[in-house]
Image (tube, rainbow, N blue to C red):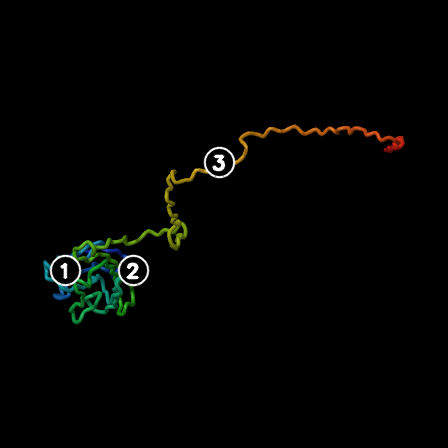
Amino acid sequence: MGIGGYDGHFKGKGKGNIGIGVQLFLLVDAGKNTPLTVINDGDEINVQDLFDTYGVRRLAFECVTFGNVKSTHLESNFGARIIDNQLPWTLFGDINGNYIGLTLDESLGLWRITCQPFSSMNVSGAAGATAEVRFVLSDGKASSQPPIPPTIPPEREPTGSPVVSPTFGPTSASVPTMPTVPSSAIPTPFPTLGPTSAPTERPALEIVPTTLPTISVPTTKPTESPLLDIRP
């Protein structure tokens, strides 16, 4: 496969062996076994355009290396991983140079692919630096174009543990509204019973003892008058 002249941009991890390394990543037409484009970090590629322009139906990913590389380790964020001991270095492998790929619908999403070369078979010997590329494969619809996060997210310690408020119900009780009673419906209160002014105090009755009259009782017997002798 002719790959001369390609110049890819990706993220390298670690120093590795300076005699071997990753040159670039390629997006490949798995149906025709031909390269389509170099994948650069942060690219967004519309697979519908690839179908309309080139008739692409299946896609594969290839890692292109330099130096005397004998094996590679490729891995993706979707779980695919492979230890490859024979060119081409592809994420899904190949059968006698025929790339194994994904359908266009299967390939949609935010991809992160890493590739590390080694100087001996079965990822042994001197290891080159791990290269990483992040990109989006979309179908042109807004819903299938997730944003590409930064390659190295900022590391920051949380200022405190988040407080989670349990939701057991409404935060305040609902108080029913009392109906308004018109003033005309309120009965007039009864008048207060009692004197409007302080009662006039009556003078105390003065009881004066009356002196009873003295009854004189004669101490002597009355003189008896002689009987009259009345004779006819």
Query: Can residue 218 be seen here?
Result: yes
Q: Taking the image as drawn, is residue 219 in sight?
A: no
Specify the farthest residue to the bottom: 96
* 11 vs 81, nearest the viewer: 81
The answer to which of marks 1 and 3 sits earlier in the sequence is 1
Q: Helix or strand or loop: what does disc 3 sit on?
A: loop
For the point 10% across and 60% down, which residue is it? 54
Q: Earlier in the sequence, mark 2 or mark 3?
A: 2
Which quadrant of the figure has residue 103? bottom left
Element type at marker 1? strand
Residue linked to disc 2: 16
- In the displayed structure, does residue 216 sit left or right of residue 85? right
Return the disc, 1 or 2, that comes first in the chain's sequence.
2
Res. 18 image quadrant: bottom left
What secondary structure is found at the residue carrying circle 2? Answer: loop
User: In what quadrant of the picture does the N terminus appear?
Assistant: bottom left
Residue that numbered label 1 is attached to: 36
Front label number (1 vs 2): 1
Query: Which amino acid, mark 1?
Result: Leu
Q: Which quarter shows the C terminus?
A: top right
